[in-house]
Amino acid sequence: MYRLLVILLVSFSGLVMALDVPFFKDHARGHFWYEVNRPVVKKKVKSVKVADSRDYVSIVDGWRKEYLRLVNKAIVTGHPSDTGNVIAYQKFLIDKAQRFSGVWQIVLAQNPNLNDSFTHPTSSKGQKLVANELEERKLKVVKGLAKTHGLLFFYSSDCPHCHEMSPVVKSFSKRFGWDILAISMDGGSLAEFPEFVVDKGQARALEVKGTPALLAFNAETKEVLNLAYGFMVEEQIIDRALFLDEYLKRGKVHED
């Protein structure tokens, strides 16, 4: 953060430094010696909110131009004093950057909701903790769906992709507790599913036109939804199950 701010300020910023001029050197005000001890007469004035009319874009542009002017002058003249002015100017910008960085940290400490490091930590350990937490949430959602949904696995015994996907489907069903019904399109079996039923119109009714096909069904509502077509690894099936959960949640919101 600190290095980034310094680079930004040095590269794109400049600052016309204002000096705190004592009143006795301020010719515009005059040499009013009695100003120091002049009694202050307090007047009741209605507080009026004045809009901030400063052009911050122009100010930052002025910083940039001033810095470039000093650098270019030092390059052209080669005078040590001009180079010293550049160094002094950079020091001023660094001080500004340090101050801004400090305020930034204070604001984050006082406003945790603005601190992305809670949800997007930068340390490897923090990132690992967040990843583990997200993974646990995913697994919880998929296991929760198993309470209301089961799987229909359509396959053909002569389909090489079905043979590749059957152990994936089997592993998924065991890992998350999903009941599964294997449906053979040609009457043959697969090693992972010695117990199966032969298709007797189910594929046509559910518009299954290819294998392997994995569908999610709700035994209570009789709703059947496509989960996966073609070969997929377990992580892809998990992602599809998460999409299914979001779909079901949106449906409930619309119904309400």
Image (cartoon, rainbow, N blue to C red):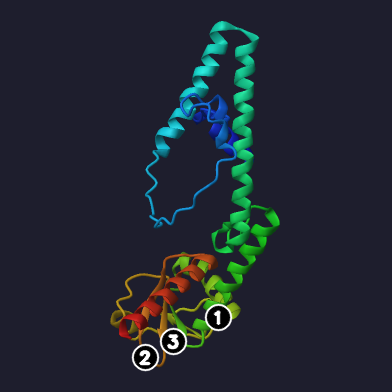
Q: Nearer the viewer, residue 108 or 181?
A: 108
Residue 143: assigned label: 1
Question: Mark 1 or mark 3, which is nearer to you?
Answer: 1
Quadrant where the C terminus sits is bottom left
Measure the alpha-carbon separation of dots 2 and 1: 19 Å
Q: What's under tag 2, amino acid-wise?
A: Thr
Q: What's under tag 1, amino acid-wise?
A: Lys
Residue 221: assigned label: 2
Residue at horizontal 61 percent and vertical 30 percent from the top: 92
Residue at horizontal 64 percent and vertical 58 percent from the top: 127
Q: Secondary structure at mark 3?
A: strand
Would you name the residue on which mark 3 appears? 197
Q: Dot 2, how many residues are within 10 Å of its Cα: few (below 14), some (14-19), or many (20+)?
A: few
Residue 246, percent from left and from top:
42, 74
Residue 74, percent from left and from top:
57, 12
Question: Mark 3 or mark 2, which is nearer to you?
Answer: 2
Q: Secondary structure at mark 2?
A: loop
For marks 3 and 2 on the same chain, the one whose residue lies earlier in the sequence: 3
Q: What is the total number of numbered labels drawn onto the structure image? A: 3
The image quarter containing residue 108 is bottom right
Residue 73, percent from left and from top:
53, 12
For marks 2 and 1 on the same chain, the one whose residue lies earlier in the sequence: 1
Q: Is residue 204 left or right of residue 57?
A: left
